[in-house]
Amino acid sequence: MENYMIARFDEIEAVECPCGFSRRGFVSPDNPKATMHMVDVQQDALVHYHKKLTEIYFILEGNGEMELDGQRVPIKPLTAIFIKPGCRHRAVGKMKIVNVSIPAFDPEDEWFD
């Protein structure tokens, strides 16, 4: 087994998610460390939070806002947001982002009020 992984996002099938479509890289049962997602935000996301995950959003394209614990912050390309567990958040507007989840993304750790 190699000591590295490669994700070719142009070959990963997009799955529907609460804010649009996500291509999820490095998702495997033997990788609990981190995952990387390329997300096409098509609509305002629902406010949600994670109890275990830390997320880093990196904005590639588009403009809009991030709602973070009720505060709206304008974003533009090349903006990065570090989202700690417990922070209620959502993307507002259409954009393309890279989302790094630490530890690896777990759909069971997505909570809505």
Image: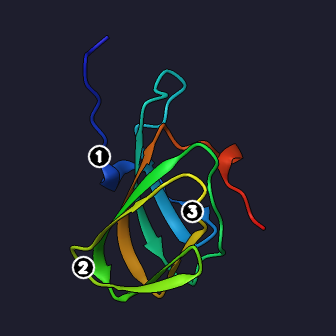
> In the rendered image, which residue does mark 1 sit on?
8
> In the rendered image, which residue does mark 2 sit on?
77
Amino acid on which disc 2 is placed? Pro
Q: Quadrant of residue 35?
A: top left
- Locate the C terminus and report the quarter of the image it occupies: bottom right
Residue 112 vs 5, above or below: the answer is below
- Closer to the chain start, of discs 1 and 3, is 1
CB-based contact (under 8 Å), mark 1 and mark 3: no
Which residue is located at x 27 percent, y 35 percent? 6
Which residue is located at x 57 percent, y 83 percent? 44
Which residue is located at x 43 percent, y 65 percent? 39
Q: Mark 2: few, some, or many residues within 10 Å (few <14, many ≥20)?
A: some
Q: Residue furthest left?
A: 78
Query: Does residue 10 appear left or right of residue 25 in this picture?
Result: left
Under circle 1, the secondary element is: loop
Separation (CA) of disc 2 from disc 3: 22 Å
Q: Quadrant of residue 79?
A: bottom left
Q: Position of residue 112 (x, y in %)?
A: 74, 64
Q: Mark 1: few, some, or many residues within 10 Å (few <14, many ≥20)?
A: few
- Closer to the chain start, of discs 2 and 3, is 2
Separation (CA) of disc 1 from disc 2: 22 Å
Say which mark, if any, is on residue 87.
3
Amino acid on which disc 1 is placed? Arg
- Closer to the chain start, of discs 1 and 2, is 1
Residue 74 vs 52, above or below: the answer is below
CB-based contact (under 8 Å), mark 1 and mark 2: no
